[in-house]
């Protein structure tokens, strides 16, 4: 497993407002959608790279990946039929630094992206951001009644280490529910 090079504090701080590339292709099984890039991720150029983020261990524990991937291997998810994007583009130290306009603009851009690439499932990682960005204040976890075109929407807990409501074992269970739902009958 390769780790991205560790950025300096100055390099991390210089990434405020920067954007990141999507890991995306047409017809994915699942397009995982974070809230927005962390400054750390923007500094190293890989998704969910901030130390303490549990995205990669959760994907492995849930069965999405055959082994524990490093953030530097985010592009390898495409070979498995998975991708990564975000609701909002600008990198911030914390997701709560995003404005309502950041989230609403991001929702419109995300909708266009999903309509273009047509993943089977859009898995939004964070119920609060989804509620705000999509104007769905009562939404809960799991499969949603709404779709984007033919793409199903599934809400999962945010894997950030700051999300104390879910520890790795609980994250693995709810992510595995999505994996099981995606398997052909």
Image (cartoon, rainbow, N blue to C red):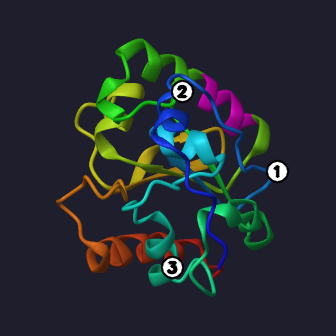
Q: Are marks 2 and 1 in contact (CB under 8 Å)?
A: no
In space, the residues marked 2 and 1 are separated at their CA atoms by: 32 Å
Q: Is residue 29 visible?
A: no
Q: Magenta part of the protein: which range?
A: 109-115
Q: Position of residue 9 (x, y in %)?
A: 45, 39
Looking at the rendering, in which quadrant would you find the N terminus? bottom right
In the rendered image, the vertical position of residue 177 relative to residue 13, given as above or below: below
Q: Residue at 50%, 25% (x, y): give it.
A: 16
* Residue 40 at x, y percent in the picture: 50, 44
Query: What residue did someone put label 1 on?
Result: 26
Q: CA distance from mark 3 to mark 2?
A: 40 Å
Q: Residue at x 38, y 77 (%)?
A: 172
Furthest-bottom residue in this view = 66
According to the image, label 3 marks what residue?
180
Looking at the picture, tell me which residue is in the foreground, 122 or 5.
5
Q: Is residue 124 above or below residue 100?
A: below
In the rendered image, residue 112 lying in the magenta stretch gets the answer yes
Q: Quadrant of the C terminus?
A: bottom right
Which residue is painted at 38% across and 23% down in the image?
Answer: 98
Image side of residue 118 versus residue 63, left or right: right
Dot 2 corresponds to which residue? 14
Reply above or below: 145 against 156: above
Find numbered disc 2 in the image and state the secondary structure of the residue it sits on. loop
């Amino acid at each position: 497993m390769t780790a991205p090079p560790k950025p300096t504090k100055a390099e991390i701080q210089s990434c405020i407002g920067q954007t990141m590339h999507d890991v995306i292709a047409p017809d994915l099984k699942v397009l995982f959608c974070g809230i927005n890039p962390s400054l750390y991720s923007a500094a190293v150029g890989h998704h969910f790279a901030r130390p303490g983020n549990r995205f990669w261990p959760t994907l492995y524990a849930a069965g999405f990946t055959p082994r524990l991937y490093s953030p530097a291997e985010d592009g390898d998810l495409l070979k498995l039929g998975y991708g990564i994007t975000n609701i909002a583009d600008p990198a911030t130290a914390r997701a709560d630094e995003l404005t309502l306009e950041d989230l609403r603009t991001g929702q419109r851009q995300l909708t266009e992206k999903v309509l273009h690439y047509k993943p089977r499932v859009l898995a939004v990682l964070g119920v609060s951001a989804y509620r705000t960005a999509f104007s769905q204040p009562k939404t809960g976890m799991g499969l949603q009644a709404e779709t984007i075109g033919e793409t199903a929407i599934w809400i999962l807990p945010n894997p950030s280490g700051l999300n104390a409501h879910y520890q790795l074992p609980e994250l693995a269970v709810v992510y595995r529910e999505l994996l099981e739902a995606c398997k052909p009958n």
